Image (cartoon, rainbow, N blue to C red):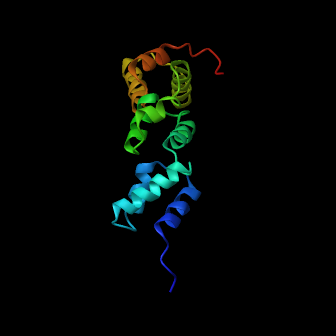
Amino acid sequence: MKPQKSLRARAMDILSRQEISRAELKRKLLRYSEDEEEIDRVLAEFAERNWQSDQRFAESYIHSKSKQHGRLRLKHALNAKGVSEEDARAFLPDRRQELQTAISVLRKKFKHPDKDPKEIQKQMRFLAYRGFDMDTIHTAIKSDWAETEE
């Protein structure tokens, strides 16, 4: 019979596969130990050694998702993963980047502009679902479709 893995070894295994937030790592480790103090000690050690970092996780997550989603959705997803807004703020796209993403996402989904109010509403709902704010949505919808994408 194989010996039980230590909590520290389990945490190292999880982090070696992917970047993960502190809250998610804690949730995963709770399956293997009910001693929260021990889990907190492991998490503190990993954070101190910079093996686990919410800032690094936020940067990685935003980098991978910001080409499809707006700031609102990114912030909400990171909040759900236990990352504070302060940790994520530096990595969120600025207004110009977010507008470019919204235009790109809109053009990819809808191949041409539409004058039908129902279609415009459909496009607006699509962008809202993707996490763009209303100012960005309106600007993206009004953008000149004849422009070439950068």
Residue sitting at x 47%, y 35%: 87
Residue sitting at x 55%, y 63%: 13
- Report whether 50 appears left or right of 75: right
The answer, for residue 19, to whether it is visible in the render is: no
Q: Which of 126/102 is in front?
A: 102
Q: Position of residue 7 (x, y in %)?
A: 46, 66
Q: Which of 107/118 is in front?
A: 107
Q: Which of 135/81 is in front?
A: 81
Residue 74 lies, with reference to residue 122, above or below; the image says: below
Residue 134 lies, with reference to residue 55, above or below; the image says: above
| Circle count | 0
- Report whether 17 appears left or right of 118: right
The answer, for residue 124, to whether it is visible in the render is: yes
- Report whether 51 appears left or right of 83: right
Q: Quadrant of residue 28?
A: bottom left
Q: Position of residue 100 (x, y in %)?
A: 56, 22
Q: Which of 75/147 is in front?
A: 75
- Report whether 134 appears left or right of 69: left
Q: Quadrant of the C terminus?
A: top right
Q: Quadrant of residue 119?
A: top left
Residue sitting at x 56%, y 33%: 67
Q: Position of residue 57 (x, y in %)?
A: 52, 43
Q: Position of residue 115 (x, y in %)?
A: 44, 15
